[in-house]
Amino acid sequence: MKAETKMIVAAAVVAALCLTAVTSVTQSWFSDEEHATVDVTTGKVDIKAEAGEISLYSLGLEVSDRFTNGGTAALGYSAADGITVTASDMTPGDRFDFLMSVYNLSTVSTLYRMVCTVSGENSSEFSISVGGAAITGYFSTEWALQAATDGGERLIEAVAVSVELPVEATQSATLSMTLRAEAVQSNASTDMVGISNAAELRAFAAEVNCGNTCEGKTVKLLADIDLESEEWTPIGTSTYSFKGTFDGNGKTISNLNISAGDRAGFFANFSGPSATSLNFDHASVIGRESVAVFAAVSSPTSTISEISVDNSTVVGGHWVGSIVGYTYGVIEKCQVSNSSLSAAPYPVGASYDNGDKVGGIVGFKSNGGVYECSVKDTIVKGYRDIGGVVGIAVKDNYDPVISKNSVENLTIIQSSENRYGSSICFGTIVGRDSGCVVEDSTISGYLKTRVDEGEINRLICSTSSNPAGFDTIEVVLNGNASIDVSDAYIKFGGPNTSKVTISGSEGSEILRLSTTYWSRVSMANSNAVLTMNNLHVTSDQESGTWNSYDITFLNCNVSLKDICFEKAVALDNSEFTSVLENVSINESHDYYALWIVAGGDVTIDGLKVNSEGRAIKISDQYVTEPEKTTLSVSNSTFVSKSKSAVIVGSTAGADITWGFGNDISNVSADTVNAVWVDEDWKDYDDLVTVTGCSKKIEGA
């Protein structure tokens, strides 16, 4: 018969490791059905370890239950760890000894070995001997063959264990030590580590952190594991990294809980060739630098694939991601959903630093690619370098490739709390592109953003590295921000975007269109609506014709509410709808405050025009085949130095409805007639109809 094998923690103070079945399903750390199928005969694998009485000494003299200076040492047993040894407040010259006996009760031929781990405050000060071998950190014997017994108990070895804090030690110390036997049927593989429960998982982590890097081994989860929100010690240290292969086997680790400093993650330091097929649910990871659910840091030679993170929270200060915090390696086919990530600046000297490089998948990425990953229903927050997939992508030897990734329903929050003046950058795929290739990205659902400062192009304008094709895009400004519109053909959203909304949170926020010439905004989807609310809006352009100087809304449906424009506005929206509600336009030049290109449908309620020049112009300039404009105005006030409140210069004419509450008493040229027909278009006077006001031909 064939049997799947799994991990055992094979030591006991009294009796453990007796893992038997009638048909003898052999259990072990080191084999599984995919990598080493074992032919099992009737029988059992049973190796047990027992610890004898402990003896304490201070400066060579035996003492009773405590060392001379009050320190203690004790033996115990843990199902996960086997024999446990704890010592506290030992001072130089203290020592304890005990005898460990290992017995074979197996009825089949067996391989076994002894494993020892050592940790504790100042534990490196100890001199530890197990069977004459000096021990530091992690130690294991070679696998040894034991013949089957006849069902009785046979002593394999009696091992003397001695732990001393030498007299030359410089300080007191504490110790945590485990000793256990591991056993497998003799024809089983020793290249596989199978893990079935939380205790075994913690034992595995402790071994790696003590020096067992598992190089050449495969660690495989054999069951879902609930860590029950108990504090997790990340696997790997600055000295020891995991160098094996990790196979999650499609299993789920739930309720991972980490509160650490740097390198906070399930793995602190992953250097193995690959990790795959592992799910995390309801993880909480808090750290400072290199923070992630799966791996804080992974090596350039590592490939991380098919890792999923759901319903999780990651909080750090620098290099923050759901899958990996910092890597030069490959990440592929990983998923993040219903999660939140944040990076906040922290004190460095007398100032603050970082709060950056935070991405839905990975915080810092160089060289190796990110392929076919997805981020859904997730919040990403930071000060700068904030990305839906990658926080920052940096070219080192070659450009990292960010390919075929998808983002759905993303929230990006840029916070300038504890700001320190560095450049702000964020994006839907990559937060900061410092040399990378981004291709074949898929964007859907909503994008919601809150921004304290910075240029918002990479949120609302599609670029090669950051597509903006969400169904809806919402940007809330908590402070001043900008959009670079130097490119005359720049467009907001993508072909499937139905609405883009840009709002101020208090109404005093300034949105600046930075430009070298044009000040145009438009939509990628001509059927979409561009909405601006509760803002001050201006641009860098200081002079020029209306189509370069004015803040121009081009070929799109636009809704403007509670907006203060600090310069002239143009609605170049022939065949589109424009709605202005409680909008003010302040123009300090002898220009038209509002230029309406012939052919649109414009509704104005509560407009305030304050112009050193003119108020509203309807014009067919640059229009080959103009159509009639429909204009409705109500509850609006006009202050201007020349022309009428509205002047029409279009061969297609206009239908103008002058509603209630309008005030033209401060229109210097005419306080009686709200509408003029431009004298150069007087032949089309009959095509200009007005309701609720009077009109005349200019100069008549």
Image (tube, grey):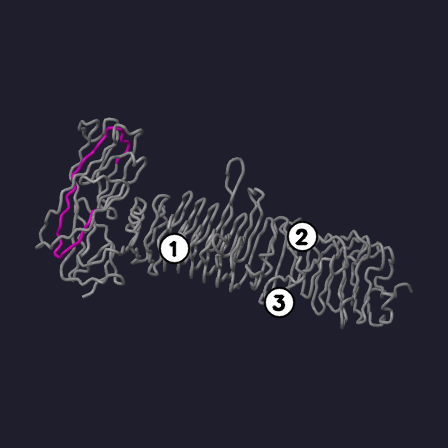
Residue at 24% x, 40% y is 135
**Which of the two labelled residues, at mark 1 and mark 3, occupies the earlier sequence position?**
1
Residue at 53% x, 63% y is 443
In the rendered image, residue 179, in percent from the top left (x then y), is placed at 22, 44
User: Looking at this view, is 434 or 573 the one in front?
Assistant: 434
User: Looking at this view, is 653 or 493 the one in front?
Assistant: 493
Q: Amino acid at mark 2?
A: Arg
Left or right of 491 in this view: 693: right
Residue 545 lies, with reference to residue 103, above or below; the image says below
Left or right of 700 in this view: 73: left
Q: Amino acid at mark 3?
A: Asn
Dot 2 and dot 1 residues touching (CB under 8 Å): no
Image mark for residue 302: 1
Dividing the picture into quadrants, the one containing residue 644 is bottom right
Dot 1 and dot 3 residues touching (CB under 8 Å): no
Mark in the foreground, 1 or 3: 1
User: Looking at this view, is 533 or 568 the one in front?
Assistant: 568
In the rendered image, residue 67, in percent from the top left (x then y), is placed at 23, 29
The range drawn in magenta is 87-114
The quarter of the picture where the C terminus appears is: bottom right
Residue at which label 3 appears: 525
In the rendered image, residue 593, in percent from the top left (x then y), is placed at 77, 57
Residue at which label 2 appears: 512
**Which of the two labelled residues, at mark 2 and mark 1, occupies the earlier sequence position?**
1
Q: What is the spatial separation of the Cα atoms under label 2 and label 3, in whole angstroms?
A: 23 Å
Dividing the picture into quadrants, the one containing residue 301 is bottom left
Q: What is the spatial separation of the Cα atoms under label 1 and label 3, in whole angstroms?
A: 41 Å
Q: Amino acid at mark 1?
A: Ser
Q: What is the spatial separation of the Cα atoms under label 2 and label 1, in whole angstroms?
A: 44 Å
Dot 2 and dot 3 residues touching (CB under 8 Å): no
Q: Secondary structure at mark 3?
A: loop
